[in-house]
Amino acid sequence: MVKKAVLPVAGFGSRMLPASKSIPKEMLPIVDRPAIEYVVKEAVRAGIKEIVLVTHSAKTAIEDYFDTQFELEQQLEEKGKAQLLAEVRDILPDGVSVISVRQNQALGLGHAVACAAPVVGDEPFAVLLPDVLVDCGGEAEDLGTMVANFHASGAAQIMVEAVPAHLVDRYGIVALEGNAPGRGECAPMVGIVEKPAADRAPSRLSVVGRYVLPANIMGILARTPPGAGGEIQLTDAIATLMQQQTVDAYSMRGRTFDCGNKAGYLQAVFHFATRHPELADVAKAMMVAEISENPADE
């Protein structure tokens, strides 16, 4: 059973400077909670019980956020702020633990995942890139479906979505055995390549940042040489895994937000503000008023 999730959070977040100079990009708030909490809660809803943060010494704020702060909770309780106390205690649900391991060198996503090998052991696991938020808008959540697919078939699951042809060189792109799967469905992969040129891309299906992988991928990563950019690429290890067993591309239902860049982060703030149980109406009114007062130049 998939009960562990690896979240690589060791990156410097250069695309979010200067804010990320002293604040981990994963801790930047999306409305009233940091982006990392959305990702952890997504994993928990999929049945994950153990979160493995692959981090470095400058990211202790993330670990602190998921720790218990007794003084704060006591103060909230003494002041009768029951709602705030409940929200603080719900940051990490009961029965879920957070473990941190260090990535001492920035050697790529594959290397970051491999750093979690001692904790993952011989169990299957999920990988969630914390830059990417996923909102399924009330439909069955994609990560949960991927985990269920893995339990049913044993095939690794790689979440994908179509991107415009001129953007394929920014992503890992998959090749399929047959037609592209429909939303919420999966199809066997026959190839995967990191950031191909547009005229060499096998499809327009990009890897989104959600994976469900078997334990033996760790051994493959340990033997994977540096690839694109001189880094150990998870896509290269997945390509090797495909030679040994079935790997499925899962076509997502939801909508993604790339919070690793400023435009994507701003879009995420707008989106989740309009879905906030307390602030939705206020957020929508503010957006309408701002557009009315500052119309785009014709």
Image: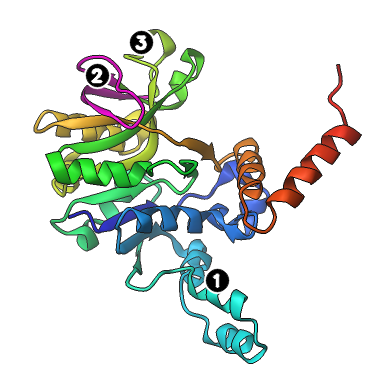
Measuring from the top left, give residue 78's x and y in whole percent: 63, 92
Tell me how many marks there are: 3
How far apart in space, not on screen, are marks 3 and 1 (Cα)? 49 Å
Measuring from the top left, give residue 255's x and y in whole percent: 49, 35
Residue at image point 26% right, 14% down: 179
Magenta residue span: 175-194
Residue at image point 23% right, 22% down: 191
| Amino acid at the residue labelled 3 | Arg
Query: Does dot 1 land on a helix, a strand or a loop?
Result: helix
Q: Which residue is labeled 3 in the image?
A: 200
Front residue of this view, candidates 191 and 159 = 159
Label 1 packing within 10 angstroms: few (<14), some (14-19), many (20+): few
Q: Residue furthest bottom?
A: 78
Residue at image point 86% right, 16% down: 298
Which is more N-terminal, label 3 or label 2? 2
Q: Residue furthest left?
A: 244
Q: Is residue 10 above or below residue 100?
A: above
Q: Which residue is labeled 2 in the image?
A: 176
Q: Which residue is labeled 1 in the image?
A: 87
Measuring from the top left, give residue 18's x and y in whole percent: 68, 49
Question: Magenta stretch: residue 185 in it?
Answer: yes
| Amino acid at the residue labelled 2 | Leu
Q: Is residue 64 above or below residue 40?
A: below
How far apart in space, not on screen, are marks 2 and 1 (Cα)? 43 Å
Front of the two marks 2 and 1: 1
Left or right: 246, with 178 as reference point: left
Front of the two marks 3 and 1: 1
